[in-house]
Amino acid sequence: MWAYEKKLQYPVRIKNPNPTYAKIIISQLGGPDGELGAAMRYLNQRYTMPYGDIIGILTDVGTEELAHMEMIAAILYQLTKNLSPEEIKRSGFDTYFVDHTAGIYPVSAAGVPFSASYFAVKGDLFADLHEDLAAEQKARVTYDNILRLVDDPDVRDPIKYLRQREINHFQRFGDALRIAQDKVNPKNYYAYNPEFDGP
């Protein structure tokens, strides 16, 4: 299914470690609107999608979200590399450090571990596509918030790239929704599930 290229989708080259930034950016790995949840959402939703072209969109975007997880992990690694105990304590990174050292562990910025409840899979064409549209907007807002708090250009650059990809994914899911609306019975969006058709 995949051809793995041993390089990041977009380069991450952070010169100055900053555990304070890592504490907030980690939300885009394991937080409620992060890349791990997005990848799991889309790659699992595709099994019940009734149309091949929408399955293709879910597979494309879900696969790209895996690449974004890799980018976020690279950002976190570079932000927390070779920290002194003083830097760890001063930044407040010590609470994370006690449990995970500088390992990459999916949690939110609030320290809540990743939960499967973050990715919604309903098995319903329209419920899932509307969830996907909302998810991309929530991820974009999270990147907006990160950009409000981070001033290092080495960190902002890949974050801005990831933010733009959320906008592109939102547009792709808009396309998927239009495809779905064109393919189903316009008088009854549930026509693909006849048990709900009334007399």
Image (cartoon, helix red, strand yellow):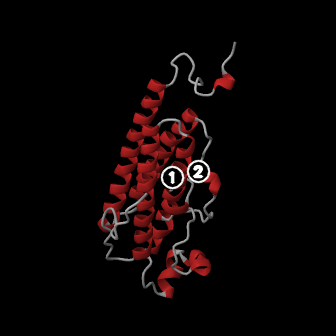
Residue 15 placed where, x, y %?
31, 76
> Looking at this view, is 25 or 55 the one in front?
55
Question: What residue did someone put label 1 on?
Answer: 38
**Residue flagged by tag 2: what amino acid is it?**
Phe
Residue 187, numbered label: none
Image coordinates of residue 22 in percent, x first then y, are: 46, 69
- 15 or 131, nearer to the observer: 131
Q: Amino acid at mark 1?
A: Ala
Furthest residue to the top?
199
Asked if residue 98 lies left or right of residue 57, the reply is: right
Eyeballing the image, is 164 above or below 104?
above
Q: Is residue 127 positioned above or below 140 on the image? A: above
Indicate the quadrant where residue 169 lies.
top left
Which class describes the residues within 10 Å of circle 2: few (<14), some (14-19), or many (20+)?
many
Q: Position of residue 146 (x, y in %)?
A: 43, 58
In front of the other: 151 or 78: 78
Residue 119 marker: 2
Q: Position of residue 72 (x, y in %)?
A: 43, 65
Q: Residue at x 45, y 77 (%)?
A: 80
Q: Dot 1 surroundings within 10 Å: few (below 14), some, or many (20 or more)?
A: many
What is the count of numbered marks? Answer: 2
State which quadrant residue 147 falls in: bottom left
User: Would you say the residues marked 2 and 1 are in contact, meaning their CB atoms lie under 8 Å apart?
Assistant: yes
Mark 1, secondary structure of its residue: helix
Quadrant for the C terminus, please.
Answer: top right
Identity of the residue drawn at 44% across and 71% down: 76
User: Separation of disc 2 and disc 1 at Cα?
Assistant: 7 Å
